[in-house]
Image: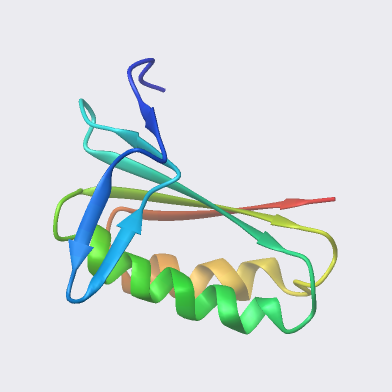
Amino acid sequence: MDKEFTREKENLVYSPKHISQTFTFKRINTVVEAKLCDAPNREKEIIAEINDDILAYKTKYSNLIFVIYDIGSIRDQELFKGSIEQAHEHVIVRIIKH
């Protein structure tokens, strides 16, 4: 990864929302967004958040990486990430199980 990055300092205005990316790598035009799945109902919420983030981030960045730290709520990892990655070019979803 690019050593030159910012953490939660870039603000992106999208419609009435101000969005702060977890990590921004300007040189490689990439955002890395981290999310925590710490409850069973968070799985659906995170999918909605990712879809909203994609719309906003794609206005400025070409490459998006979503890292989800899961404490056991996501049952089917392939289904979770596959639909998102197939629907959006240059979007990667990785799930880290605890």
- In the rendered view, does 34 fall on the left or right side of 27? right
| Residue at (28% x, 42% y) in the render | 10
- x%, y% of residue 41? 73, 84
Figure check: 58 above or below 27? below
- In the rendered view, does 44 fall on the left or right side of 49? right
Callout count: 0
| Residue at (33% x, 17% y) in the render | 4
Q: Is the image coloured rainbow, by chain, by secondary structure, or in one colour?
A: rainbow
- x%, y% of residue 16? 21, 76
Give the image quarter of residue 12.
bottom left
Figure check: 45 above or below 27? below
Q: Residue furthest top?
A: 3
- x%, y% of residue 63? 28, 47
Please identify the quadrant where the N terminus is shown: top left
Q: Identify which residue, 94 or 78, lies in the foreground.
A: 94
| Residue at (44% x, 69% y) in the render | 50
Figure check: 75 above or below 1? below
- x%, y% of residue 53? 35, 66
